[in-house]
Amino acid sequence: MNLLPPLRSALRLLPSALPARQRQLSGQKATVDGISYLLPVNSEPSPVLMTAFPIDARAAATLIPGEELHPFRLPGGRSLLVVTVINYLATDIGAYIEYSLALAVTRGMRPAPPLLPMLFQKTLNLGQYVVDLPVSTEISVKGGKGIWGMPKHQASLDFKVTDRTVSSAYELDGVKGALVEIDRPAPTALPLKVGAVNYCSFRGMLYKSSIYFQGTADVSIGRQAKARLEFGDLPQVAGLAGLDFDPQPVFTLYIPDSHGVLDDHYEAWFQYGRDRAPYGGDGMDSVVGLGLGEEWPDPPRRGESRVQ
């Protein structure tokens, strides 16, 4: 029995994840740090690549600062390394690629039970802690980091789509950061309407921001999912490169036509530790001198990697 048609029908009935406030802001204008926005802060149809690999939860915990965030737990003491690459084709700040390397987390005084946050995402504060977030343009760094506290920095990125694969490379000054490739999932055409939470370190504080996506997704789960992830020698990915992740992904996802909205509301509060102050990300000095440039660095060379 083919379960895809009834699943598509059920997903179409779900309401949009976008809060009413964001819909009410439509057409309003704002200027923040010299960047002009037509609200809501959205993107037009843009391709998305996403996959997640199992990792040891205890090892993941060593990369998460402070005492409020905990690795999301799968059975068997595993957690998830999440890779998301978005090729933003049209936004208020121009076109750019965003390459997110993150750890699935929950927020609270103690870790959440395994798997349960999938059912109670808001109650158990399911999200991802963004470890590294290279982007193509200076203006994206200025906005994403200076306003929402995201660990953005400019790097050489690409986004390549073929009939069989979707891949993205990340390099900085000729040094490899990461390379991810997925086999294109079967055309499931699932109508997704989802929200996600990012936690980021900046200025010694923990920033929480929300993003909402909808689009038609092709998804593979379990053994049907095929992906490859390679890390290079950049210091920004050293912690992630040291993780012993399972080469078999939990899922792969490709959305050729995503529509996204980044909520202009965010929260920030002190990061703290019982024995010493935890890592708090870059300081304000890392964004003060940034301009509004939309130029991209030269594309990655991809070197001798087997993912070409």
Image: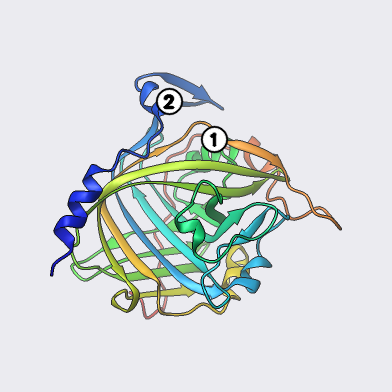
Asked whether 261 or 300 is in front, the reply is 261
Residue 299 image offset from top left, x and y in percent: 39, 59
Q: Which mark is residue 291?
A: 1
Asked whether 130 or 73 is in front, the reply is 73
Q: N-terminal of the two: label 2 or label 1?
A: 2
For the residues labelled 2 and 1, say whether their Cβ atoms are less than 8 Å apart. no
Residue 296 image offset from top left, x and y in percent: 42, 49
Outermost residue to the right: 275
Q: Residue at x 63, y 66 (%)?
A: 235
Q: Quadrant of the C terminus?
A: bottom left
Q: CA distance from mark 2 to mark 1?
A: 30 Å
Amino acid type at image mark 2? Arg
Q: Quadrant of the N terminus?
A: bottom left
**Above or below for 247 versus 176:** below
Q: Which mark is residue 21?
A: 2
Q: Residue at x 58, y 43 (%)?
A: 208
Amino acid type at image mark 1? Gly
